[in-house]
Amino acid sequence: MKLEEELQTKGFENEHQKAFLNVLFTAEWLRYRINKWLDQYDLTHEQYNVMRIVRGQHPMPVHLKSITERMINRYCNATRIVDRLLEKELMTKQTCPSDRRALNIKLSEKGLELMGEIDAHLRSNDMVGRVLSEEDSRLMNDLLDRLREAE
């Protein structure tokens, strides 16, 4: 559905305004669908993001500060998110030997298995790949990168 129909508007001041609103609207549209889908795993988007970051360093542990720096939404409380994942037994933590104030975080076996299950589902239900070609995706990535680099 076109953005004008979604937002029930007759038009925009210019294509720049439309592009700005389209990025915001589409980000929320995707976030809603991802959160709805992650409900079946009893995870939020932010929890999945933290698990993805930690798994990216597996088998090495990750410092909590490093997780915060690499999150998509850096305004989330990473400590609270990690605590919830620890309660669900999807992660483990240890005090860092070189800095007793820092925590080393790792995925538990249960967390690794869950990520494998999620990965398999994502590969078989690739929403972006069904709609956009590889070249379209590359172009979109380049344009979004340029937008962020302008700051």
Image (spheres, rainbow, N blue to C red):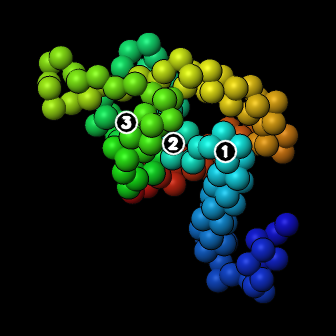
Residue occupying the point 15% across, 32% down: 101
Instruction: Determine the secondary structure under disc 3.
Output: helix
How many angstroms separate mark 3 from mark 1 (CA)? 20 Å
Counting residues from the start of the chain, the first of labels 3 and 2 encountered is: 2
Q: Is residue 86 above or below residue 39?
A: above
- Disc 1 marks which amino acid? Leu
Percent position of residue 142, x then y: 60, 43
Percent position of residue 120, x then y: 74, 25
Percent position of residue 111, x then y: 55, 25
| Numbered badge on residue 67 | 3
Residue occupying the point 49% across, 29% down: 89
Q: Is residue 64 left or right of residue 24?
A: left
Whether residue 34 can be seen here: no
Q: Is residue 55 left or right of residue 129?
A: left
Mark toward the viewer: 3 or 1: 1
> Observer-nearest residue: 52 or 91?
91
| Circle 1 residue | 38
Asked whether the beta carbons under mark 3 and mark 2 sit within 8 Å of each other, the answer is no
Mark 3 packing: few (<14 Cα in 10 Å), some, or many (20+)? many
Q: Quadrant of residue 81?
A: top left
Percent position of residue 59, x then y: 44, 13
Mark toward the viewer: 3 or 2: 2
Q: Quadrant of residue 32?
A: bottom right
- Disc 2 marks which amino acid? Gln
Instruction: Determine the secondary structure under disc 1.
Output: helix
Counting residues from the start of the chain, the first of labels 3 and 1 encountered is: 1
Asked whether the beta carbons under mark 2 and mark 1 sit within 8 Å of each other, the answer is yes
- Disc 3 marks which amino acid? Ile
| Circle 2 residue | 47
Counting residues from the start of the chain, the first of labels 2 and 1 encountered is: 1
